[in-house]
Image (cartoon, rainbow, N blue to C red):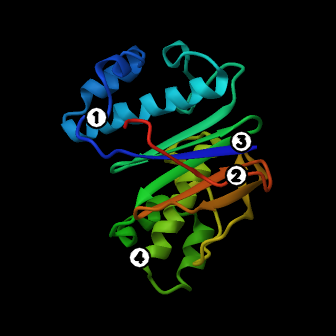
Amino acid sequence: MVDSWFVRLNASEPFSPEQLEWLDGYEIERYLLIKDETKAKRFAAAHIALRQILGNYLNVRPFDIEFYSNQYGKPFINGGPAFSLSHSSDGILIAISARGTIGADLERIKTVDFQSILCDICSDSELKRLSQYPYNQIDWLRFWVRKEAAVKAIGTGLQSLSDVAIPFYSKKSDYFRVTLRQNGNLKFWYLYDLDIPYGFMGSIVTNQARIVKPIKIVDIFS
């Protein structure tokens, strides 16, 4: 099964000093390197939320969770469930799968000039197909969210965006199958669009079919 949580940050001080101590040295280093104070706090809050949810999921203390990463930076837990974290503006999306592999992406609905970066993020086959569609901001944002979730699922980093081709469906879909290339091989994956309130859009890509539960809206930092 795939569980997903959406957390919205409503406070200027979303976490306590004690919660900040849950983060490991690598997370603290990244937090301190972010010069924008709001963005730094949101980064820390996202990782605190991930540790709290994973801690409840694994029945361990949040600060006892030890993360590792593959050569492309995709984090994982030895012997633990697959998970994916995404945050945008004041929203956090966390997805956990007891088995299999997963990628999740969250974006606040906004205006983005996707036409200027098409060649950087699209495969050749996508560029041909996309030329048949009239430009629509919401459709393009949904395409981007799905594509980033797919890249995070296969764990090859954002530099492989142009190597991953996904369908360009204008309508939100509860579930459909996609074919992704991983380590030179084509494999079937499953893409889910999430119902997220407050002006956000999110998707999950996993190799597990029809097992994504409805998203949970939680308030961790109240």
At horizontal 67% and vertical 34% (from top left) the residue drawn is 82
Residue 43 shown left or right of residue 63 in the figure: left
Q: Earlier in the sequence, mark 2 or mark 1?
A: 1
Up/down of 71 relative to 85, above or below: above
Mark in the foreground, 3 or 2 = 2
Q: Quadrant of the C terminus?
A: top left
**Number of the front mark, 4 or 1:** 1
Q: Is residue 70 visible?
A: no
Q: Which mark is residue 118?
A: none
Question: Farthest residue toward the front?
Answer: 222
Q: Secondary structure at mark 2?
A: loop
The residue indicated by pointer 1 is 41
Dot 1: within a 10 Å radius of its alpha carbon, few (fewer than 14), some, or many (20 or more) residues?
Answer: many
The amino acid sitting under disc 4 is Gln
* Residue under numbered circle 4: 137
Task: Give me the residue at 39% from left, 72% from top.
Answer: 115
Secondary structure under the numbered disc 4 in the rendered image:
helix
In the rendered image, the vertical position of residue 4 relative to residue 170, given as above or below: above
Q: Is residue 142 above or below residue 189?
A: below
Which residue position holds label 2? 213
Q: Is residue 173 left or right of residue 145?
A: right
**Residue 166 location (% of width, % of height):** 64, 64
| Direction from residue 171 to residue 180 in the image, left or right | right
The numbered mark, 4 or 1, whose residue comes first in the sequence reads: 1
Looking at marks 2 and 4 on the same chain, the residue that comes earlier in the sequence is marked by: 4
Find the distance from the CA under tag 4 to the CA under tag 1: 29 Å
